[in-house]
Amino acid sequence: MEQIIGQILTILRGAWRYRWWGVLVAWLVATVGWVAVQTVPDTFEARTQVYVDTQSVLQPLLEGLAVDRDIGGQVAMMQSVMLSRPNLEKVAKKTDLLVSAKSRTEEEAIVDALADRVQLSTFTGGRGARAATNRFVVTFEDSDPNRAFKVVQAVLDTFMEDTLGLKRTDSDVAQRFLRSQLADYETRLFEAEQRLAAFKQQNVGLLPGGSRGDYYTRLEAEMATLQQMQSRQRQLTERRNELQRQLEGEEPTYGLMGSADGSPIDQQIAGFQAQIDELLLKYTDRHPQIAALKETIARLEKEKLQGAKISPSVAPPGAGISSDEALVRSLDMNPVYQNLRLALSQADADLAELRGQLGAQQAQVADLRSKVEAVPEIEAELTRLSRDYDVNKAQYETLLKRLESAKISEQADASSDTVKFRVIEPPFKPLAPVGPNRPLMSTVVLLAALLFGAAFAVFMAQIRPTFSTRDTLQSITGLPVLGSVSAAIVRSIAPWYRQQPFMVSSAIGLLLVVFLLNLVLADNIRHAILRIVG
């Protein structure tokens, strides 16, 4: 630490020898700097404040009907558009800044400089986040107040024009895009409809129904139905056989009366024939149910010929017998036999009908099994065509809905702007300069002058060193110093020599006085310097 202090003292002693050189340099630097500060041209600032009002009465009413605009994003986009290069070029042309340009390169340089000098900031003096976000301040500084005013006015006018045109262009571009896409998807939808219709026409009868399901589901359902019919057939066959066995053990009559015309077998045959006539209205005589009924009639005819009929004492209607005789004949009938006979006939009819249905069901199952390779491929192709149709239809309906929303939004914008601009502070011609900050610059010049003066004195001491102490001489030469001789000062200059510190302080103090006068009389000194400089 002592060595460091010693080195500092040595440097100061060396610099003190060139004190007047340092004072002279400080005065020169300060004088030149203050003159330069006074010759710096004044800077005038023109400014304007714009408030972006994003509140609209229609906005809550049109929610869900019109396009929801991102107001925050729209404001940010407007902020970037304001200082875009095309806008700055328009501003430069309106304010005649490009008149002095002699080439395209100079024009580009002027526009670049304009982009750096035009400042766009968010106003922070209001209350709330909305005031700080939607309020913008445009400022421009120039040495000519008229030019500063013209630039700010041109920026504001260009911004207002381009923003309004931007909203209209944005809506038109969106609608043109939606219309082009809508026409494209309309064509796709029509083609998908045609392909689907042609496919259905070519494969009619092989396509799955809405409730029947796909091929394998239909085949499984038809096979289950066939199994149920076969089980029902076995039950009816067993029931018929049982009725036939019971019928063989019963006598038709008690043998009280003689024979009579007419038989219930004839009535059954007539009933079955009526069913055949009714079925022939719908089907041909090859229908399984009709064939089964004919077999039943043939069997009844055979039984009738063999004498297997109900008691001959039962007379047909209209036989001309008395009521007493009819009563006696009715008592001669065996009711168990008659009931079994009727049940057997009904079982034969049910079995015949079930055989017809069973044949049709077997044919249907066989038909489905024969198409085991073709039908799944047809169903897969139908699924693909239906999927394409559904996708195109969904996209078409979505685009149509959005186009209508865009139209409503355009009409809403035309009737009431969602974003309004209010010029809070219009541009005006500045009367007083806002810069440069000459007091600060003069202070910096003073500090720089003192620093340069001290640095110059130290520099001179370094290039022309001397030994101010015995220790310095001994440390540098490495030789022992036996003694030293003090300086011999002439008696006549001794007072002047003693007053050196005071005189140096006075010179620096006078420099500070000139600095203060430069601050107080800045305008007068500036006008005088400008007149001298011309």
Image (cartoon, rainbow, N blue to C red):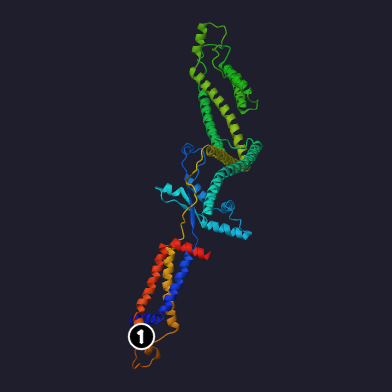
Please, is residue 43 above or below residue 163 in the view? below
Please, is residue 96 above or below residue 222 in the view? below
Taking the spot 56% from the left edge, 27% from the top edge, the residue there is: 351
Taking the spot 43% from the left edge, 49% from the top edge, the residue there is: 132
Instruction: Classify 10 Å Cα crowding around label 1: few (below 14), some (14-19), many (20 and above).
Output: few
Image-quadrant location for residue 165: top right
Q: Is residue 482 left or right of residue 376?
A: left
Q: Position of residue 176 (x, y in %)?
A: 61, 42
Q: Is residue 497 left or right of residue 112?
A: left
Q: Can residue 338 be seen at all in this image of the molecule?
A: yes
Tell me the residue that label 1 is attached to: 492
- Mark 1: which amino acid? Ser
Taking the spot 43% from the left edge, 73% from the top edge, the residue there is: 26
Q: Nearer the viewer, residue 67 or 102?
A: 102
Q: Is residue 490 left or right of residue 279?
A: left
Q: Can residue 379 be seen at all in this image of the molecule?
A: no
Q: Nearer the viewer, residue 397 or 470?
A: 470
Please, is residue 187 above or below residue 455 in the view? above
Q: Is residue 201 left or right of residue 31?
A: right
Question: Element under label 1?
Answer: loop
Q: Nearer the viewer, residue 388 or 459?
A: 459
Q: Position of residue 25 (x, y in %)?
A: 45, 75
